[in-house]
Image (cartoon, helix red, strand yellow):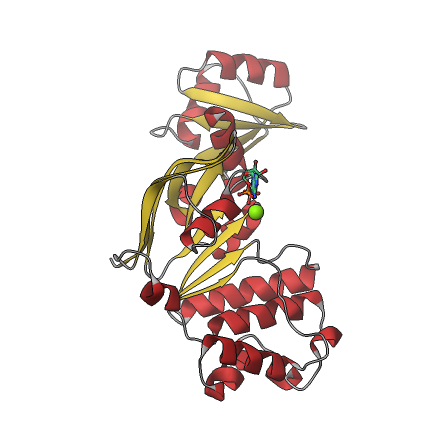
Amino acid sequence: MERILEINSLYKNYGKIKAVQDLSLTVNAGSVFGLLGPNGSGKTTTLGIILDVVQKTGGTYSWFGEKPGNESRKKIGAILEGPSFYPYLSAEENLKVTAQIKNVSYERIDEVLKTVNLLDRKKDRFQSFSLGMKQRLAIASALLPDPYVLVLDEPTNGLDPQGIADVRSLIVKISGEGKTIILASHLLDEVQKVCTDFAVLNKGKNVYTGSVEEALSNKEIVEVKAHDKDNLIKLLKSCSFVTGFSENHQTVLVHMDHQKNAFDLNQYFVANGLVISHLATNKKNLEEQFLEILSQSS
Ligand SMILES: Nc1ncnc2c1ncn2[C@@H]1O[C@H](COP(=O)(O)OP(=O)(O)O)[C@@H](O)[C@H]1O
Ligand SMILES: [Mg+2]
């Protein structure tokens, strides 16, 4: 698989603040890679470094298997800060300005406006746009030079639910057209909805890397309800293959060894004379895993 980005043991200190520590990760072609982490975990700093706007303290990174430079920069479309456009100019005129700055022809303007669903609004002034439309125009602008990779920092921040849905489906669409996307987000459901792979940052460290599909399918939790909840809890505590459980109102969520499943758990209850009223398997969601990862790593 083609390597788009490789980061090796990256460090960034701001004085005493260790913003990025020993961060390594790989982004493969065609993926939508999510950099997931709470605020202050070093996501923007990492993107700043790989886009060459923040100076690193240590470590290396390479784009497309090459040392970063002008050639690689041309293949990357990025939006780090919020969109900056001229309010009085139309969408189309603003993209003409971008095209001039980036030295690309006007020919792609309609195409990128179509991609972001703004073609019918191209004559409208930027200031008349909703935040979601402004963000989509920013994405259009990043797509103008037809980059291999699109880098987005918190792409749905501040948007209303419709704007969020539009930008997320746009990201999936752009990915479907063959571009690799790297995005930073503090939102788990965002990563879950749009990313194929992700890394979890905590205090500047990469504490987890994996595919979203694997993260979603890997772990099973079993929901159990019993009228005799006290006995249920007691049995769970003494069960050898139960690794943990949490109570959620009347339901108890049971975490087990990988080799065990709901059937084994039910058998255990039966063998110990507990009658249960509800038993269901439940894929552990990314949020629970994310919280677990962060609690284990801090
Ligand atoms: N220009 C800067 N000067 C000093 N500290 C900074 C600067 N930029 C970021 N930081 C600090 O670095 C850490 C990581 O910040 P950041 O990369 O913005 O995290 P995130 O994007 O995950 O919210 C935070 O502690 C932040 O306060
Ligand atoms: Mg940030």
Determine the image quadrant of residue 188: top right
In the image shown, does 71 or 158 lie closer to the viewer?
71
In the image shown, does 59 or 274 lie closer to the viewer?
59
**Residue name at image x 35 percent, y 62 percent:** 30
**Residue name at image x 47 percent, y 14 percent:** 272
Image quadrant, ligand 1: top right
**Residue name at image x 54 percent, y 81 percent:** 114
x, y (%) of residue 271?
Answer: 44, 16
Image position of 107 with respect to 112: above or below:
below
The quarter of the rendered structure image containing the N terminus is bottom left
x, y (%) of residue 246?
Answer: 57, 25
In the image shown, does 228 or 145 lie closer to the viewer?
145
Is 283 placed left or right of 40 in the picture? left
Is 8 placed left or right of 289 in the picture? left
- Can see residue 280? no
Determine the image quadrant of residue 85: bottom right
**Residue name at image x 55 percent, y 22 percent:** 275
x, y (%) of residue 175?
Answer: 43, 66
Image position of 262 with respect to 233: above or below:
below
Image position of 287 with respect to 273: above or below:
below
How many numbered discs, if any?
0
Is 170 placed left or right of 262 in the picture? right
x, y (%) of residue 134?
Answer: 65, 69
Farthest right residue in view: 128
In the image shown, does 90 or 264 lie closer to the viewer?
90
Image position of 191 with respect to 220: above or below:
below
- Can see residue 249? yes
